[in-house]
Image (spheres, rainbow, N blue to C red):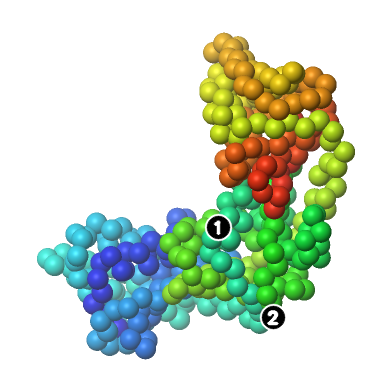
């Protein structure tokens, strides 16, 4: 295998694939990226056995072939080369090495046999549909902050993607994404894409969600989604991301979404979030508790810490019901308000101990539930 490629093109592709590779591996080949030259293009593949990424890029090919090289080392070398450099890769012969040349720089990297590199096939993906990149970005951004990091509840370590026959406002079939960690819940939906009818409910792992989000940041192309009960594949531009799904049952989230909350509080989302952020500066890092005292069109935000002191701030709101005091984790509150794009956020509350529903005043497609704290 021998080729020459522009540094910027190689760096971009290596940046995408190397982030899938775990820093610590008990299986040496999983630390490597596979480099494969065929049909006039260079293909780069990386996998951790649960997630695999393949990206192809144009290069000046001299001879076809394939090899593997340490993913993070190769990425760091190319990253440190000067802009505009032409990178030559040569893995000829049986030396078990990859030679990299660029200008006066020369590196020799140890290779491992491509026959050892695991091939993660997606198998049959009977459900196929397309999503706009912007829609997929919004779906991820508005839910992933609520994904649980608690490994014992592994079925919460991802986004639950499923079809619902009728949206809450009676608008027909929707594709819904839900994430929860037991303290907060995010539920977002969009009109069901063509071809998505009858899809199984699947849990897309957190690492897959994060890698996908980085990749689609750079594209405006439609993303092709292929889906089975066990795997999911996202394809766009010259990238293909294939992942195993979490084998578990997502809980019945509808049961934790209250329907009888009768106290409605409307706030200017930007001003409210800024005030929460300021007041939370004083609260202890562990609890990050902020209390909301709502009465007569005013919400008083307060926080206290035995070490730092106290903080209060008042903001005007729309509120007509009985006075209420309720506490929240400030970080969780800010995570939700950051996803609200409209000017107004609506809080629907029952009492200080019951979950609160938060909605975007201008967008009915997203709903958030937040458990209160004792303060």
Helix, strand or loop status at disc 1: helix
Query: In the picture shown, does residue 311 fall above or below 78?
Result: above
Viewed as shown, does residue 80 lie left or right of 163? left
Cα–Cα gap, marks 2 and 1: 24 Å
Mark number for residue 126?
Answer: 2
Nearer the observer, 13 or 330: 330
Question: Which one is earlier in the sequence, the residue at label 2 or at label 1?
Answer: 2
Please say whether residue 21 is visible from this viewpoint.
no
Query: Which residue is at a point 32% across and 78% down the rendered structure image?
Result: 58
- Estimate how packed mark 1 is, as few (under 14), some (14 to 19) or many (20 or more) residues with alpha carbons within 10 Å: some
Looking at the rendering, in which quadrant would you find the C terminus?
top right
- In the rendered view, does 219 fall on the left or right side of 41? right
The quarter of the image holding the N terminus is bottom left
Task: Give residue 137's mark.
Answer: 1
Mark 2 element type: loop
Q: Which mark is residue 13?
A: none
Question: To which quarter of the image does residue 250 belong?
Answer: bottom right
Pick whichever, 207 or 159, lies toward us. Answer: 159
Q: Residue at x 70, y 32 (%)?
A: 266
């Amino acid at each position: 295998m021998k080729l020459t490629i522009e540094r910027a093109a190689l760096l971009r592709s290596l940046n995408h694939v190397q982030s899938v590779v775990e820093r610590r591996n008990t299986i040496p080949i999983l630390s490597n990226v596979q480099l494969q030259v065929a049909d006039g293009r260079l293909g780069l593949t990386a996998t951790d056995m649960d997630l695999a990424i393949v990206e192809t890029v144009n290069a000046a090919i001299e001879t076809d072939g394939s090899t593997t090289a340490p993913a993070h080392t190769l990425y760091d070398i190319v990253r440190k080369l000067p802009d505009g450099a032409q990178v030559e890769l040569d893995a000829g012969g049986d030396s078990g090495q990859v030679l990299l040349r660029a200008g006066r720089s020369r590196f020799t990297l140890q290779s491992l046999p491509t026959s050892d590199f695991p091939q993660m096939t997606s198998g049959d993906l009977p459900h196929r549909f397309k999503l706009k990149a912007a829609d997929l970005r919004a779906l991820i951004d508005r839910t992933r902050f609520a994904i649980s990091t608690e490994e014992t509840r592994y079925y919460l370590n991802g986004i639950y993607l499923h079809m619902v026959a009728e949206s809450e406002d009676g608008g027909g079939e929707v594709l819904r994404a839900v994430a929860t960690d037991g303290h907060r819940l995010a539920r977002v939906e969009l009109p069901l894409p063509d071809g998505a009818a009858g899809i199984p409910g699947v849990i897309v792992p957190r690492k897959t969600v994060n890698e996908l989000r980085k990749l689609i940041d750079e594209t405006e192309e439609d993303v092709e989604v292929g889906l089975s009960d066990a795997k999911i594949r996202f394809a766009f531009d010259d990238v293909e991301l294939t992942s195993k799904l979490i084998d578990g049952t997502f809980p019945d989230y509808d049961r934790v979404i209250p329907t009888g909350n009768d106290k409605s509080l409307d706030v200017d989302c930007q001003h409210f979030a800024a005030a929460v952020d300021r007041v939370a500066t004083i609260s202890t890092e562990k609890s990050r508790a902020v209390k909301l005292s709502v009465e007569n069109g005013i919400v008083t935000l307060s926080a206290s810490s035995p070490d730092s002191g106290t903080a209060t701030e008042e903001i005007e709101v729309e509120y007509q019901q009985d006075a209420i005091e309720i506490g929240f984790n400030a970080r969780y509150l800010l995570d939700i308000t950051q996803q609200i794009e409209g000017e107004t956020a609506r809080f629907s509350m029952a009492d200080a101990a019951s979950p609160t529903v938060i909605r975007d005043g201008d967008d009915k497609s997203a709903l958030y539930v937040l458990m209160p704290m004792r303060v």
